[in-house]
Image: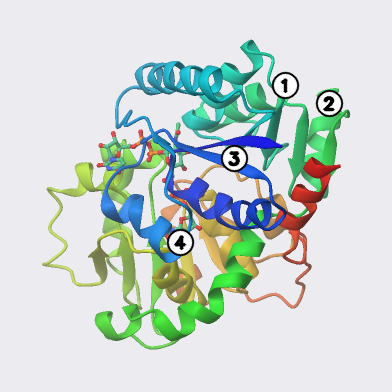
Amino acid sequence: MKILTIIGARPQFIKASMVSRSLHKKGIHEILLHTGQHYDENMSNVFFNEMEIPKPNYNLGVGSGSHGEQTAKSLEGIEKVIMKEKPDLVLVYGDTNATVAGALASSKLHIPIAHVEAGLRSYNRRMPEEINRVLTDVISSYLFCPTKLAVKNLKKEGITDGVFLTGDVMVDSLLHFTKLAETEATIMKKLNITSKNYGLMTIHRPANADDREIMFKLIDVLNQSPIPLIFPIHPRTRKLLSEFDFESHKTIQPINPVGYLDMLILEKYAQVILTDSGGIQKEAYLQKVPCITLRPETEWIETVEDGWNTIVNEEYGRLLELIKSPPIPKKWISHYGEGNAAGKITDILLS
Ligand code: UD1
Ligand code: UDP
């Protein structure tokens, strides 16, 4: 069997790493295509190196641009590779422009699509990711769902064929790399921080990161945080914040985006995590760290229902109290599986 895997952005490298390993172990021929959507050393290469992801067979180098431009360039490049490689199946991950481009290119060439992280919904169609997910799910033949809720969401849309509850591949990555992170990561020393004495924050959603008013309001409040906040800044967010004077406050400590091993450690030992990232909300839950989600809603509803994740949208006044005493519930359920999602996906594809 020959599989063409499409990846392009940071979370997809992390999601693909364990599936890729599993495919190789079972002797499946995988061709890896990187659209090049993320290209900075610390947004792309670092993950390939740390997680031993094979070097992509193709890099389309699409880079940054508007949604139309980025998706169109990816679509065109992926189509060419599919025609040349003639894979039996195309594997796509998550909800980025690479995901929808891969799915569209394959469906028009009648190549079956497998979607890892199918069925997720925010029900907010102003999010580019929501459009990407809905479109990808509709044309996928194999829909690998991380949660029971994802299966239910698909059912509501009339999608039941080819739907499999596999658990979340991000659990596989987290479990596999935590031990290595504990021995290899140097970030705590480098930043001179100790366990549970700091918060971790990330922001990159366009609804926050592209809105000057929201960002400056948020940063003003967070600069009064009772604990230091380590802030690995996504390049989208860096553009808007380049004029912000972090030096004169010192509470928020901006740093460059970090590799996966450093990130796992920063998450694990944080007192609280503030984020608008999908993956980081889930990793916070998996590492039993309270999370504050800076968005109007989340796809990872289980984390909110169990009390580990608090949604804060614009009522930023609440943030300081939440940082000081974040809720630490007793309830914790392995909603995202036990860490064998990649194996299940491989077995389903083989059968
Ligand atoms: C993309 C995904 C989003 C995902 C996020 C993960 C889409 C629609 N969005 O958003 O779902 O959560 O990745 O991080 O696919 N930039 C750099 N260097 C890079 C990459 C980006 O400087 O290596 C800058 C560019 O100025 C670019 C901006 O960041 O315009 C945004 O990058 P882009 O890939 O368009 O979207 P993300 O916000 O990263
Ligand atoms: N991540 C990382 N370094 C960082 C920020 C995030 O390794 O500086 C990892 C994080 O641990 C998670 C993934 O990137 O596994 C989440 O990606 P991101 O927040 O970019 O996108 P989203 O999950 O929101 O699509």
Ligand 1, image quadrant it occupies? top left
Say whether disc 3 or disc 4 marks the residue closer to the N-terminus. 3
- Relative height, residue 112 to residue 173 (above, below): above
Packing grade of label 2 (10 A; few <14, some 14-19, many >=20) is some
- Residue 182 placed where, x, y %? 47, 83
- Eye-nearest disc, 3 or 4: 3
**Residue 306 position by quadrant:** bottom right
- Disc assigned to residue 159: 2
Camera-side residue of 152 and 57: 57
* Separation (CA) of disc 2 from disc 4: 34 Å
Q: Which residue is mark 3?
A: 93
For residue 125, say whether it is visible.
Answer: no
- Residue 122 placed where, x, y %? 63, 37
Q: Which residue is mark 1?
A: 138
* Separation (CA) of disc 2 from disc 1: 7 Å
Circles 2 and 1 in contact, beta carbons < 8 Å: yes
Q: Which residue is mark 4?
A: 274
Disc 4 C-beta below 8 A from ligand 2: no
Say whether disc 4 or disc 1 marks the residue closer to the N-terminus. 1
- Eye-nearest disc, 3 or 1: 3
